[in-house]
Image: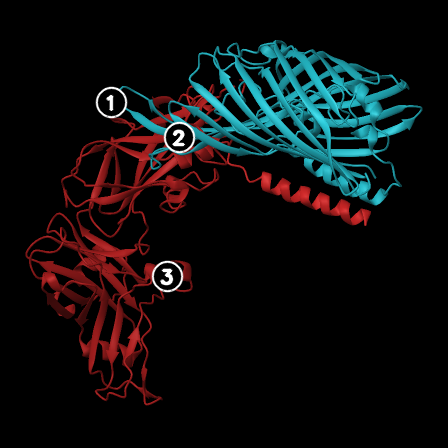
């Protein structure tokens, strides 16, 4: 009995304890009257923290484009999309039975595209032409491929009204050409060209994002015959799938290749480029304070060469490579994903000018207490549509006049001895 | 009353269970809120009272063995005993900006005692000396440059308390005399965290800084009780030693543990009852150098009057009825304004389980004001105390 009563009482005590722990502690209406501790003062400073920077063209590397850039701006920019069908099936299925392809009723290139927004929609009909660009020469070089876009190699084309450019285009191709490759077991390599009376850009799906252009073959008019869909496949370079895989489809630039001068940092453009900035932030700030804002201030230089008012997103990215990699081009391929470390993008138009601010506090905070070998103090800049759209954003680099060089604005909380009443 | 408890056979298992329970509460000896009058400076002095003493407004503090104030009262404890308290407080603070209501929990007193023979009783316990746990949240706008500003919300949170761990001994050399001594370790910590968040979360990242302030110090105490048929008087004092405040391994400041002196006189001419008056003085100003120069600690009187009366019998138990009034000055000023507190208290108590368990309850209503400051604070505190004598 005694034990039961004691346990009951201690149980009651436990219940009260738990109930009493349901606290509501927050108060603040009497601040600042009764609150001796006030908000900690923030310190704001802007420093020339960028110690080196450079722009590397040709990134992403050929075949790694998210979308293929099909552009025609005359002498300014001309690009082509190359799609490889190095393996073609030689049979089709009819009523569950395999049959050898002896004839082809129709063949199409099922071409996924990014629907142009209202600002980028072509103002005139566009024609997409398909050429047989198979060659024994090195067919990733523009100088070799460009001559292959000639009338005797044209295997198909179709003209589209601007409003018909929605999500997928069906481009008919020569059944004879396809049948010849099927029967002979040889590869079919198609080059796409866009033609219009006005400058035009189109983003075509690629295998990089699983949206490659599919060759659609109907071998028989019989409705029981299943069509054959052929995805892009590249077998060259032979026995090097790491290299041949990305070359299933890619973009080549015939005209309009530009270089970024040393006083500028380029993002996007033709060929696509990324920029790299390395920082040296004083340890007294990075390691001894708490940073609440870090803004990379860049002065934009207007680029009116192409699509000057078509805005695009520019991402700041963390460089993830360690110190063993010193080649900047390689460093710029080992970058974080957009949004990683809470790095935010900016939407900019090539013709814009003035100072822009990339918020990189999430990245700068990772530098605290870490050596630069562990946490590289650098940032990469890339376009969201790199390799897909010719627009280029330029910023002044560290080699530009002092007033327009990259700067880092840091807002931080100094080390404080707070807590003493 | 403790001297009237019936002694029975012990139960080691119950004692072990309750003691384990007590230990589980020790790390959470104090929790509460801020932006108020009572928790200025290093915090709110809970008084180191038992629930029973609370019921009398504090008037029995020098006579009550469950209050870790006068070590001489330990000699009253006839058998092994463990005790602990729970004290939730419901507080409202009113200023011109509005009223904040907070609910807080306290576990301000835990200890055990054991008779060791020949009238000696030893005790080890911990009680809250100053409880600083608090949270305040406020919005401000900071100008970074002439053209750049940022609205932000600051949360300032303090968890922890300055605690008094006492090893005490009481001795009753004669029926009319009890004496006692205590050695005190002043310990505990304040975990302070500041979190600032920003309305513009795209540019600014929330930041949090934490810091732990640790206390280490010592004191000694001594007390005496004189007993007659009609009157019992108790006197005690504490002599403070050095008190250091450090952060990690860095000594920040030093001060002295406040000296204290107190006296209670009780009329015990009514059976099983006591009517008492008490006053004490704490030299809190000695803590002034422990904080920043802006910290203002003041020496304070604490005076109370109360009664612990044998009420009706419930079954074979006596139900004790208690009431009291207390007035005191709190140790830390709000700005330059001294904070005072008046409390009305009431309570109940009885023995259960054939005297093996003592249960006490007290309800305290406190009003705190600071002359010249347009702020007031009111609090209801419920104190639950349980003592077990295995």
Q: Return the x and y of residue A128 as percentages of the image width and height.
A: 14, 64
Mark 2 is surrounded, within 10 Å at the Cα level, by few (under 14), some (14 to 19) or many (20 or more) other residues, namely some
Q: Is residue A125 above or below residue A92?
A: above
Q: Residue at x 85, y 42 (%)?
A: B12
Q: Residue at x 81, y 47 (%)?
A: A2
Tell me which chain the residue with mark 2 is part of: B
Q: Return the x and y of residue B243 as percentages of the image width and height.
A: 67, 14
Determine the colour of chain B: cyan
How many numbered marks appear?
3
Left or right of B145 in this view: A287: right
Q: Is residue A221 above or below residue A200?
A: below
Q: Return the x and y of residue A401 as percentages of the image width and height.
A: 24, 23
Image disc number at residue A144? none
Left or right of A253 in this view: B390: right
Q: In this orientation, does residue B150 appear?
A: yes
Q: Quadrant of residue B56?
A: top right
Secondary-structure class at tag 3: helix
Q: Are marks 2 and 1 in contact (CB under 8 Å)?
A: no
Determine the colour of chain A: red
Tell me which chain the residue with mark 1 is part of: A
Q: Between A256 and B97, which is closer to the camera in this rendering?
A: B97
Disc 3: which residue: A244
Secondary-structure class at tag 1: helix
Left or right of A378 in this view: A184: left
Image disc number at residue A403? 1
Disc 2: which residue: B153
Left or right of A54 in this view: B176: right
For discs 1 and 3, the disc positioned in front in the rendered view: 1
For discs 2 and 3, the disc positioned in front in the rendered view: 2
Q: Quadrant of residue A94?
A: bottom left
Secondary-structure class at tag 2: strand
């Amino acid at each position: 009995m005694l034990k039961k009563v004691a346990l009951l009482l201690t149980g009651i005590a436990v219940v009260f304890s738990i109930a009493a722990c349901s606290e509501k502690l927050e108060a603040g209406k009497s601040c600042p009257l009764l609150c001796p501790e006030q908000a900690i003062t923030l310190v704001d400073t802007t420093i020339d923290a960028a110690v080196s920077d450079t722009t590397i063209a040709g990134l992403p590397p050929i075949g790694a484009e998210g979308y293929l850039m099909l552009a025609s701006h005359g002498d300014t920019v001309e690009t082509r999309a190359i799609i490889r069908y190095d393996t073609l099936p030689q049979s089709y299925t009819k009523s569950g039975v395999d049959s050898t392809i002896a004839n082809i009723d129709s063949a199409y290139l099922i071409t996924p595209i990014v629907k142009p927004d209202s600002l980028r929609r072509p103002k005139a009909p566009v024609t997409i032409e398909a050429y047989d660009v198979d060659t024994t020469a090195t067919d990733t070089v523009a100088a070799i491929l460009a001559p292959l876009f000639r009338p005797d190699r044209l295997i198909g084309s179709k003209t589209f009204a601007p409003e018909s450019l929605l999500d997928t285009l069906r481009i008919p191709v020569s059944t004879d050409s396809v049948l010849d490759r099927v029967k002979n077991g040889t590869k079919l390599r198609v080059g796409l060209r866009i033609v219009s009376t006005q400058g035009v850009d189109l983003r075509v799906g690629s295998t990089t994002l699983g949206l490659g252009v599919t060759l659609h073959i109907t071998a028989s008019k019989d409705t029981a015959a299943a069509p054959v869909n052929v995805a892009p496949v590249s077998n060259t370079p032979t026995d090097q799938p790491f290299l041949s895989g990305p070359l299933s489809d890619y973009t080549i630039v015939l005209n309009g290749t530009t270089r970024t001068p040393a006083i500028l940092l380029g993002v996007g453009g033709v060929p696509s480029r990324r920029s790299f900035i390395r920082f040296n932030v004083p340890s007294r700030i990075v390691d001894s304070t708490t940073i609440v804002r870090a803004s990379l201030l860049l002065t934009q230089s207007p680029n009116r060469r192409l699509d000057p008012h078509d805005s695009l997103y520019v991402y700041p990215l963390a460089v993830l490579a360690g110190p063993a990699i010193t080649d900047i081009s390689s460093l710029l391929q080992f970058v974080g994903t957009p949004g990683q470390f809470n790095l935010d993008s900016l939407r900019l138009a090539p013709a814009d000018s003035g100072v822009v601010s990339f918020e990189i506090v999430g990245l700068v905070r990772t530098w605290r207490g870490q050596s630069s070998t562990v946490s590289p103090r650098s940032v990469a800049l890339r376009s969201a549509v790199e390799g897909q759209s010719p627009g280029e954003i330029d910023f002044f680099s560290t080699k530009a006049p002092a007033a327009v060089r990259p700067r880092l604005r840091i807002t931080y909380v100094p080390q404080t001895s707070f807590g003493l009443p | 009353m403790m001297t009237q408890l019936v002694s029975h056979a012990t139960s080691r298992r119950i004692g072990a269970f309750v003691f384990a329970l007590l230990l589980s509460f020790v790390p959470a000896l104090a929790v509460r809120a801020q932006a108020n009058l009572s928790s200025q400076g290093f915090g709110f002095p809970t008084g180191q009272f038992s629930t029973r003493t609370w019921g009398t407004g504090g008037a029995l503090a020098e006579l009550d063995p469950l209050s870790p104030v006068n070590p001489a009262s330990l000699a009253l404890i006839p058998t092994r005993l463990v005790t602990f308290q729970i004290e939730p407080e419901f507080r409202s603070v009113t200023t011109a900006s509005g009223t904040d209501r907070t609910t807080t929990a306290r576990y301000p007193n835990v200890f055990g005692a054991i008779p060791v023979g020949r009238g000696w009783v030893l005790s080890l316990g911990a009680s809250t000396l100053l409880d600083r746990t608090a949270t305040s949240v406020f919005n401000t706008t900071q100008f970074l440059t002439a053209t750049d500003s940022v609205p932000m919300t600051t949360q300032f949170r303090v968890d922890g308390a300055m605690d008094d761990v006492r090893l005490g001994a009481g001795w009753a050399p004669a029926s009319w005399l009890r004496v006692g001594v205590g050695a005190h370790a002043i310990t505990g910590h304040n975990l302070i965290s500041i979190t600032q968040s920003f309305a513009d979360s795209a540019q600014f990242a929330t930041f949090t800084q934490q810091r732990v302030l640790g206390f280490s110090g010592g004191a000694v105490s001594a007390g005496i009780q004189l007993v007659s048929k009609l009157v019992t008087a108790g006197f005690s004092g504490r002599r403070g030693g050095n008190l250091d405040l450090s952060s990690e391994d860095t000594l920040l400041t030093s001060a002295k543990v406040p000296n204290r002196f107190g006296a209670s006189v009780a009329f015990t001419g009514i059976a099983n009852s006591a009517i008492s008056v008490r006053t004490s003085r704490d030299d809190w100003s000695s803590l002034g150098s422990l904080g920043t120069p802006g910290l203002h600690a003041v020496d304070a009187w604490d005076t109370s009057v109360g009664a612990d009366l044998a009420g009706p019998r419930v079954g074979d138990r006596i139900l004790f009825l208690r009431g009291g009034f207390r007035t005191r000055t709190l140790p830390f000023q709000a700005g330059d304004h001294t904070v005072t507190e008046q409390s009305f208290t009431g309570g109940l108590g009885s023995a259960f389980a054939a005297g093996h368990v003592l249960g006490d309850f007290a309800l305290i209503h406190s009003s705190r004001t600071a002359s010249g400051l347009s702020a007031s604070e009111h609090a209801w505190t419920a104190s639950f105390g349980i003592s077990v004598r295995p």
